[in-house]
Structure formats: structure tokens, C-alpha cells
Image (cartoon, helix red, strand yellow):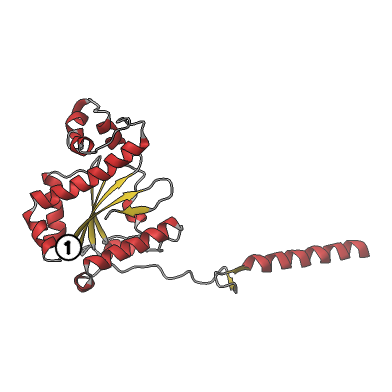
Amino acid sequence: MVKIINTTIVALVLLTVTSCQQEMKPNKTGTENKVSDEPAALVEEVLSKEQQEALSPDDVITLLKDGNKRFVNSDLTARDHSKQVRNSTLSQYPKAIVLSCVDSRVPVEDVFDRGIGDLFVARVAGNFVNEDILGSMEFACKVSGSKLILVLGHEHCGAVKAAVDDVKLGNITSMLQKIRPAVESVVYDGERNAKNQDFVHMVCESNIRNSIAQIRLNSPILKDMEDKGEIKIVGGVYDMDNGKVAWLD
């Protein structure tokens, strides 16, 4: 009888200790907090007009670079998206417009650790520029006050590879013709095909630079804003292998 009672007591003690241990966990500073403690406050606010106006183009570049570092380190900012949606219902003052490829592996807002209301994002396979994209950029910068245009290409881009190999297929054929000038402008003595990753990378950068040139050439509004220092037009390449964005000179 005594043995049974002792066994029961030991079991109760172990259960109590285990329960206490589960209620405690170390935080990032090495101290202990209860699991039931309130979580860290989520970001609820969206960019205001005053905050947007206070930013310079270089400020925005710095913010995007810092955000990309957090993305690479899996340290994304915790945001209350539901409240950000409601807080941005009547107005928006994004920092920048990003022209990206449609590729599903390039989550633009996450890549730069941005929330709702932070970025305009235009997407088209191969991140090339046309009249509709230019109009969207003019709206973003001239009308809505964005301070930066970023043309964001990426490694392993299917559209760039297809343009390199001059693929013919339905409407893709005419779409790829927008990228072909970037292929033809690359000076390279090696194999000029999609299997050559070095050449594809060179075309990717060439396509970004060509898009930037097209923006300046075909949008007097944006060119004038850039000349006045109101905006910057820059390029970058997203590396799918590590999540980093390499900014072009």
C-alpha cells in the first residue's frame, strides 16, 4: 500500500514540474517569460503623406536594402494586415514602385519586408517596360508621390531564357520581342543559349538596364522628376538561391 502511494506522489510531482516547464520559455534576451504573456505588438500603421514626403530617394533605397537583409535572415516584421487594410482604405502613400517579373518565386513585398501600403508593384514576364507600365509608374510617382522606381529582375528567369532561345508560342512570341533587344546588345563570344547561365545572367542585367533606359526615353515626366532629384530610377537582381537583391550601379 505504501509503495502504491509513493508511486502516485512521484507521478504527481513529475506532472507538476513538467507543467511548470511548459509554462516558461526563454526569450531572445535569455530571460524567461510565460507562454501566456502578451505577444509583441504588431505593426498596424501605414505610411502617411507626411512620412512619405519626408523620405528622399536614397532613404527609400536604404529601407529596401535593410528590409532585404531581414528577409534573408528570416526576420520579417510582424504586421497586423487586417488593420493595415482598414487603415489604408481611403488613401495610399507608397515609398516606391517596383517593376518585377510575374514569377511566383519572387514575392516582392516579402523580399523587402514591406507591408500593405508600402509599395506599388507592377508585374510582367521579363520585367520589361511598355506604355501601360509607364503610365502606372507616372501615377505612382507624379500623382501618388513615390520616391523610387526599381526594376527588379531575377536569376533563372524563364522569360529571359525564352527570349535568349527566341521561343515562338502564341502571344508569348510578341511578348519576348520586348526582351530580345537586351539579348542582342550583349557582347559575348561564348554560347548564346539558355543553357549557358553566365550568358543568361548577362542578358538579365542587360534587360534591366534596357528597361531603365526605356523609362527615361519614353516618359518625359519621370525623366524630369529624376533630373530634379525627386525620384531615382534603379535596378536590381533577385537571387533565388539565397534571397538577396544585388543592386546595379
Name the side, left or right, on which 102 lies relative to 16.
left
Residue 85 % position (x, y): 28, 61
Q: Which quadrant of the figure contains the C terminus? A: bottom left
Front residue (pair 132, 221): 221
On the question of residue 202 being in view, the answer is: yes
Name the side, left or right, on which 45 lies relative to 185.
right
Q: Residue at x 21, y 73 (%)?
A: 54
Front residue (pair 93, 100): 100
- Residue 104's place in the image compared with 196, above or below, is below
Q: Quadrant of residue 232?
A: bottom left
On the question of residue 1 being in view, the answer is: no
Name the side, left or right, on which 216 lies relative to 81.
left
Front residue (pair 94, 221): 221
Residue tagged by mark 1? 231
Front residue (pair 90, 209): 209
- Residue 162's place in the image compared with 235, above or below, is above
Residue type at mark 1 is Ile
- Residue 4's place in the image compared with 172, above or below, is below
Residue 240 % position (x, y): 39, 45
Q: Residue at x 27, y 32 (%)?
A: 164
Q: Quadrant of residue 155?
A: top left
Q: Residue at x 31, y 69 (%)?
A: 45
Q: Residue furthest front?
A: 189
Residue 162 % position (x, y): 28, 31
Question: For the residue carrying disc 1, how many other residues have a C-alpha within 10 Å: few (<14), some (14-19), or many (20+)?
Answer: many
